[in-house]
Amino acid sequence: MQAIKFFPLLFCVVCAAPSVRIYPEQSPPQLMTLPSNATIIRTDITDSFSCEGREYGYYADVDNDCQIFHVCLPVNYGDGRSQMFRWSFICPEETVFSQEIFTCISRDDMVIDCMESPKFYILNRNIGVEKEHTREEDSSSPMPQNHSSIDDVPAVPEVPQSLEKKNLRKAYENKRKVIE
């Protein structure tokens, strides 16, 4: 008699099992595509930064004290769809992301405070923009005396000492003649 009560219960459990999934909780480093050992550098990583509404560029994450930065890339497809991509990176130990120069630097070298970084997000508009030089700018700022121009640099480098020692100078010179 108890078997009759047990089998319907077992049947319900077996039928419900495929719809009940247990997912391991993903930690912020995994969600943000950071290296698995990112928590060694920063233990309390929060994933609150959003790229929505932003243009292409590098963004300091102030919620993570600028130790993490993100690259946002909006993509517009030909069929009218648009999608935002985000890549997240963590700066090495004892460094933070400088929104001013788009690189990780020592906290002591920071010119602007991390919390002020959003004011400098606009600098992303300068990525890929070439500064126009005028003739006056070129003549007003002469080249420093210790700086060599491109004309001073030989097209093919001289023979390295290591080749000289191994008696490979002849083979090197032949290759050099072909290049010239």
Image: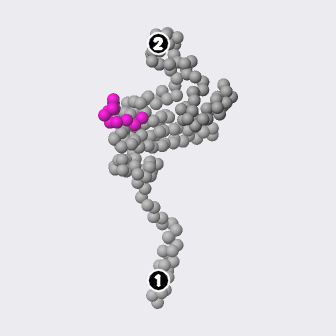
* SS of the residue under disc 1: helix
The crowding category of the residue bearing disc 2, from other C-alpha atoms within 10 Å (few below 14, some 14 to 19, many at least 20), is: few
Position in image of residue 83 (x %, y %): 54, 42
Please provide percent x and percent y for residue 121. 42, 32
Q: Nearer the viewer, residue 161 or 114?
A: 161
Give the alpha-carbon distance from disc 1 to disc 2, as whole Å. Answer: 93 Å
User: CB under 8 Å between callouts 1 and 2?
Assistant: no
Question: Is residue 106 highlighted in magenta?
Answer: yes
Relative to residue 128, is residue 132 depicted above or below?
A: above
Q: Residue at x 48, y 78 (%)?
A: 10
Residue that appears at 55% across and 31% down: 160
Q: What is the residue that sits farthest to the bottom in this orientation?
A: 1
Where on the picture, by quarter, is residue 102?
top left
Region rendered in magenta: 103-113
Residue at point 45%, 13% (across, down): 141
Q: Quadrant of the C terminus?
A: top right
Which amino acid is tagged 1? Phe
Of the pair 31 and 162, the residue shown nearer to us: 162
Image position, residue 3 (x, y; %): 48, 87
**Is any part of residue 165 visible from this angle?**
yes
Q: What is the count of numbered marks?
A: 2
* Front position in the image: 44 or 140: 140
Q: Is residue 115 visible?
A: no
Depth-wise, is mark 1 or mark 2 nearer the camera? 2
| Quadrant of residue 166 within the rendered picture | top right
Please provide percent x and percent y for residue 81: 58, 41
Q: Report which residue position mark 2 lands on.
A: 142
Q: Which mark is residue 6?
A: 1
